[in-house]
Amino acid sequence: MHARRRIPVGTPRPALRGLALSTTPVTDALPLTALTALSPLDGRYGRLTAPLRDVFSEFAFMRARVKVEVEWLLALSRLGLAELPALPAAAVERLRRLVDGFSLADCEQIKAIERVTNHDVKAVEYWIRERTADEPALAAAAEFIHFACTSEDINNVAHALMLAEGRALLLARLHGIHEALRAAAHELAEVPMLSRTHGQAASPTTVGKEFANFAVRLARAIAAIEAVTLTAKMNGAVGNYNAHLAAYPQVDWEGVARGVVESLGLAFNTHTIQIEPHDAMAQLFDAIARANTVLIDLDRDLWGYIALGYFRQKLKAGEIGSSTMPHKVNPIDFENSEGNLGLANALLRHLAEKLPISRWQRDLTDSTVLRNLGVAFGHCLVAYDACERGLGKLELNRERLAADLDDAWEVLAEPVQTVMRRYGVPGAYEKLKELTRGKGIEREALRAFIAGLPIPAEAREALLAMTPARYVGKAAELARRC
């Protein structure tokens, strides 16, 4: 090994080379394609996350901002202000078309303005002015575009609208997974399966009941996501309508703001600082993360059942499981799902913890974080797709399930000792523990033990007729009730 060269204390260190920052655009960068995208959500998984581009991209954000600005201006025009006469139908239609026909070219124009203003919301305001300058009524109303608003009055409403759309996309996929689980629960309600608690053989269940457990949990999680009420505000720089009242003290500005927010399908938040406090967002992200945690549990259980041989996976022509082991059919869909759910939850939980916190009446730490909503939702979509694909590949291996049950007669120690206790046989638990713990028991040995029990003949015959495959309690009934 080479000795490490010592540098005397106080010796000036050479400047690091290659770390100087430059504002000069990189001209030799790779073009942006699915193969050069920095994030796999836009690259490898781009086809799965494509629906989110129309919801969480910067283009979608700009379009939502335009919508909010337009709705605010229209609301002002209905107040009967002397300085803002009611807009004629043609002007109203012109404003609506700005939203309905919003294009990538329009977004590029806003971005060009932003390069001058260095302010995205102000760029939207200027763009609306430019696009409506040739309409006399709208040109006269130009000073009422973004009137009395802070940027967050526009942004928070836009974000809430985007989240409503994004939630609908996630829910559609979650409902699909739930239906697949429910169908499996009903179809396999009667198929017995050895349970494993702590990884060890335990009281049998049915395959359908295990799917039902996840179906019920996921249904509750879906309901929690659906129940979140998204909130928004339009109350000015620090939430007090200061500028509004300075200009028009006679106007019920809280009522005006509420009307705009509620007309967009959102709940009105009456008490805020400059930003809407994002508590509803946090509630939504926590709810999605809980649903994702249920699916992580599902992914891991199914991975394990595949490893035990309880399920085979349908083969796909041309597909390879290992570059060196030709026999392998790996549970890659459930692994992919688990990994992306973990990434999604890391982001969702950071969003939920960070966004409700803002120093005093405003800091900007939420702004850059909120630009990653689509990233969190993107990992969710990738995970849900993988989980659905994995469920679709499962084929039950009934022979393996039956063999495992037939090799686990020790699980009947539970009903035997319970019946013994009913009839007052002393030391029931301890006797079965001595007979079975850590060593299992063969069918005939267990039957011989039962035959000698001092219990009623009817109870004895019921125990002798019992097998691991028949000892499933209400599993089948519960499976059908999901």
Image (cartoon, rainbow, N blue to C red):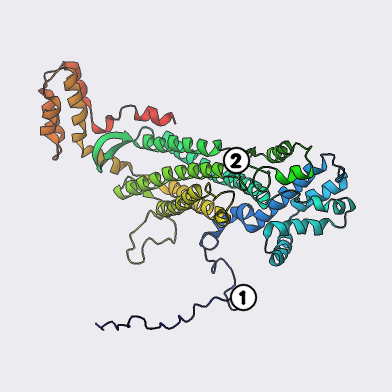
Residue at the outermost right position: 136
Residue 427, given in percent of the width and then of the height, sits at 11, 24
Q: Nearer the viewer, residue 170 or 470?
A: 170
Q: Nearer the viewer, residue 401 or 70?
A: 70
- Against 438, residue 116 (above or below) is below
Amino acid on which disc 2 is placed: Leu
Query: Dot 2, crowdedness within 10 Å: few (<14), some or many (≥20)?
Result: many
Task: Name the quarter where the N terminus is drawn.
Answer: bottom left
Compared across the picture, whether 410 is left or right of 469 comes to left
Compared across the picture, whether 78 is left or right of 62 comes to right
Residue 349, given in percent of the width and then of the height, sits at 46, 49
Q: Which residue is mark 1?
A: 25
Task: Name the quarter where the C terminus is drawn.
Answer: top left
Q: Quadrant of residue 259?
A: top right
Please tell me whether mark 2 sits on a helix, a strand or a loop: loop
Query: Dot 1, crowdedness within 10 Å: few (<14), some or many (≥20)?
Result: few
**Residue ID at (44%, 46%):** 391
Please tell me whether mark 1 sits on a helix, a strand or a loop: loop
Compared across the picture, whether 69 is left or right of 397 comes to right
**Residue ID at (21%, 25%):** 465
Amino acid on which disc 1 is placed: Pro
Q: Which residue is mark 2?
A: 230
Compared across the picture, whether 270 is left or right of 212 comes to right
Q: Nearer the viewer, residue 330 or 48?
A: 48
**Residue ID at (72%, 36%):** 255
The span from disc 2 to disc 1 (Cα, nearest Å) is 40 Å
- Against 259, residue 23 (above or below) is below
Residue 426, given in percent of the width and then of the height, sits at 11, 21
